[in-house]
Every structure is written in C-alpha cells, then in structure tokens.
Image (tube, grey):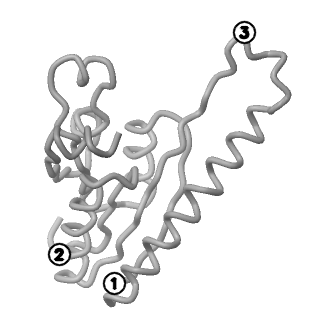
Amino acid sequence: MLPLSTVLCPSDFSEPSRQAEKIAVELAEHFGAQLCLVNIVPIRALLPHESGFPFAVSEHEKMLQAHAGEKLRQLAKQITTEGVNVRTILGHGDAAGEIVRIALHEKADIIVIATHGMTGWRRVVFGSVAEKVVRLATTPVLTTRGTELETLSNA
C-alpha cells in the first residue's frame, strides 16, 4: 500500500466532502500520487404518476451529469494549481457500489471519503454511503467525519 500512487476521493460537493478532499490532496502531495476525484450521479427511476411528464428522464440525467462534471472540473482545476496531478471520474448508479467499482478499476491505494455525521432517523432514512464503502471495499478506506450540524446547514 505504501507509498501511495493513487488516492481516490469521492465527493458530493458538501462541506464534509471538502474536508475529505483536503486530506486526499495532502496525501497525494506527500506521496506524489495521482488524485482521482469521483462524483456519482444517482439513477432516478420514473414514477408511474410521472409518466405523462414531458421532461424525459434521460434528459434529466444528462443535465445532472453535465452539472456534476462541471463541478468536478472546477474542483480539479483548483487542486491542480496546488501542484497535484488530478483526474476526474463521473459515475452513475448506486454511490457505494460505484465508488468501490471505480476504486478497483483505478487500482486505488486508498479511498478517502467523508461521512456526514448523521445519526438517529436521518442515518436510517438516508443511509451511509461511507459505511457501505467501508464494508464493500477491498481497498483501505480513510473516513473523515463531518458533524451533523454541518450536514443540516447544507441541506
């Protein structure tokens, strides 16, 4: 595992993710590793009552992907100015599964991912992508914890 050559950092562009990005950048700088920034666009199923809606799901997904891709490029541009070699990867589908799949495909040495610090009913309802990544990944995972207050203020 050491020295690191590829650091993978999923981002949902939240404040907790920004904290994870900072750690990932430091690791990449320290080891001269490539940083892979990842965002996963969820697939949204069309509900039966929406079938008459003129806005096609594929158009909606394309817009989401374009928006996420642009945000990833902006983030990468900021980090590149710090002297880190950055690649962006846009996935789609189940966030945890995609993160693990991308980490394997990219031969990542470590995944740096933020938790959102949710507890109680919020964690039950929204789940924890980071927790699922920790359970599913064969790659070492470094989690950083956001506070529930940060998460709520960004909602």
Q: Is residue 15 left or right of residue 107?
A: left
Quadrant where the C terminus is found in the figure: top left
Which of the labelled discs sits on residue 48, or is there none? 3
Q: Quadrant of residue 132?
A: top left
Q: Position of residue 43 (x, y in %)?
A: 59, 33
List the single residue furthest toward the front: 153
- Marks 2 and 1, Cα distance to the nearest angstrom? 16 Å
Quadrant where the N terminus is found in the figure: bottom left
Per the image, label 3 sits on a secondary structure element best described as helix
Q: Position of residue 98 (x, y in %)?
A: 45, 42
Determine which residue is flagged by label 1: 84
- Marks 1 and 3, Cα distance to the nearest angstrom? 46 Å
Q: Is residue 66 left or right of residue 116?
A: right
Tell me the kind of residue under disc 1.
Val
Q: Residue at x 71, y 47 (%)?
A: 62
Q: Residues within 10 Å of mark 1 (few under 14, many from 20)?
A: many
Tell me the kind of residue under disc 2.
Pro
Q: Residue at x 22, y 34 (%)?
A: 131
